[in-house]
Image: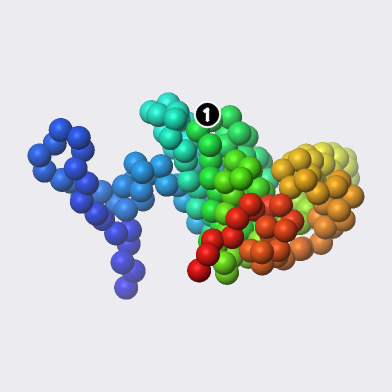
Amino acid sequence: MPIGVPKVPFRNAGEEDASWVDIYNRLYRERLLFLGQEVVSEVSNQLIGLMIYLSIEDDTQDLYLFINSPGGWVIPGMALYDTMQFVQPDVHTICMGSAASMGSFILVGGEITKRLAFPHARVMIHQPAGSFSEVATGEFILEVGELLKLRETLTRVYVQRTGKPLWVVSEDMERDVFMSATEAQAYGIVDLVAVE
């Protein structure tokens, strides 16, 4: 039997009695955000909305994005990455579990020096993929062109944020490259590995 989302008591400033709120809403109030699933438009938009709202509420307090994601769609992931760069507060990224594909792209997008992986976390990078089944030839060519542009953009970001040479990142993105937390630190995707 599923337990659902746990609820915790929370008292707003000036209120006498606490109300019960789901744990994620309580943690959001502490500026702790979670990406714990595939990156799709709905999830990306929710996180973008939270980042912008919290930034408007107080642009001096950092945000913390905990990531355990198998990856997902490129465009929603890039929208989330761009928002992380746009908001005034620094965004700490914390990998727990895994940050694969678009999850690793969002992980590397955290404020440099404020990207962390838990000791047993796994990180995976690779090139973006497309779905070309049953696509007419003209559309296929357009899709491949767009995919190549996206790949170039992603590669450029990894190069900029890891400090790795373009040829290294380009070569690594040709296939799935899995890394431990310490390997991800050596690569420049994270800055720190949490101590057990």
Q: Residue furthest top?
A: 56
Report the front residue among 186 and 45.
186
* Residue 159 image position (x, y, % from top left): 79, 44
Residue 30 left/right relative to 115 = left
Q: Amino acid at mark 1?
A: Gln
Residue 27 falls left or right of residue 191:
left
**Is residue 61 something that shows in the picture?**
yes
The residue drawn where x is 74% and y is 56% is 187
Q: Say what secondary structure mark 1 lies in.
A: loop
Tell me where residue 160 appears, x and y as whole percent: 76, 40
Q: Is any part of residue 154 visible from this angle?
A: no
**Image position of 127 with respect to 51: above or below:** below
Q: Residue furthest bottom?
A: 1
Q: Which residue is mark 1?
A: 88
Depth check: give the residue in front, 124 or 162.
162
Above/below status of 14 relative to 21: above
> At which x and y percent is residue 123?
66, 61
Q: Nearer the viewer, residue 156 or 92?
A: 92
Q: In the rendered image, which quarter contains the N terminus?
A: bottom left
Image vertical order of residue 38 relative to residue 54, above or below:
below
Q: Is residue 176 left or right of residue 105?
A: right
Q: How many marks?
A: 1
The structure residue drawn at horizontal position 74% and vertical position 47%, both measured from the top left corner, is 162
The residue at the point 81 percent across, 49 percent down is 164
The crowding category of the residue bearing disc 1, from other C-alpha atoms within 10 Å (few below 14, some 14 to 19, many at least 20), is some
Quadrant hosting residue 120: bottom right
User: Can you give x and y, in whole percent of width and height, for residue 44 in the image?
Assistant: 54, 43
